[in-house]
């Protein structure tokens, strides 16, 4: 069953940036793009590097800082090798200036 879990405050992630948050034992990379927030698994499917900490956000693309694999922050889909498997994406909601991740 899906549940909505509080991740952080809206103000914790500046527009145009990404951050790794621990949500119920899962490391999740959350990006703030324009007026929207997106969340994907923090671990690159290629070599298990942190996307939120070591990665680079370029518009809606996350570039892994270890080997350059690219993922769509909105879907988790692979955009570029060396990764061949997508990462899980999560729905983000906002309530009372708090971000919630649907797990």
Image: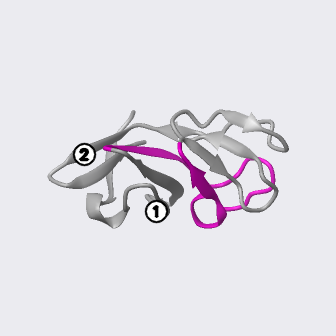
Q: Quadrant of residue 79?
A: top right
Colour mapping used in the image: one colour
Q: Are marks 1 and 2 in contact (CB under 8 Å)?
A: no
Is residue 32 shown in magenta? Answer: no
Per the image, the residue denoted by label 1 is 21
Of labels 1 and 2, earlier in sequence is 1
Q: Tell me what residue is drawn at x 52 percent, y 55 percent.
A: 29
* As drawn, 1 above or below 14: above
* As drawn, 86 above or below 21: above
Residues 47 and 64: in front is 64
Q: Quadrant of residue 48?
A: bottom right
Q: Quadrant of the C terminus?
A: top left
Q: Secondary structure at mark 1?
A: strand
Q: CA distance from mark 1 to mark 2?
A: 16 Å
Residue bounds of the magenta highlight: 35-59
Q: Tell me what residue is drawn at x 44 percent, y 43 percent.
A: 38
| Left or right of 7, for residue 47 | right
| Left or right of 61, for residue 49 | right
* As drawn, 22 above or below 96: below
Pick out the residue farthest to the left. Answer: 96
| Left or right of 54, for residue 68 | right
The x and y percentages for residue 22 are 47, 63
Per the image, the residue denoted by label 2 is 94
Q: Residues within 10 Å of mark 1 (few under 14, many from 20)?
A: some
């Amino acid at each position: 069953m899906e549940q909505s879990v509080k991740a952080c405050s809206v103000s914790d992630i500046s527009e145009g940036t990404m951050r790794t948050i621990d949500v119920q034992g899962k490391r999740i990379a959350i990006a703030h793009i324009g007026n929207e927030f997106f969340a994907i698994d923090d671990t690159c499917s290629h070599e298990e590097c942190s996307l939120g900490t070591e990665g680079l956000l370029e518009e809606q693309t996350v570039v892994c800082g270890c080997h350059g694999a690219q993922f769509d922050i909105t879907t988790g889909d692979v955009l570029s090798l060396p990764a061949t498997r997508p990462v899980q994406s999560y729905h983000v909601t906002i309530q009372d200036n708090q971000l919630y991740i649907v797990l």
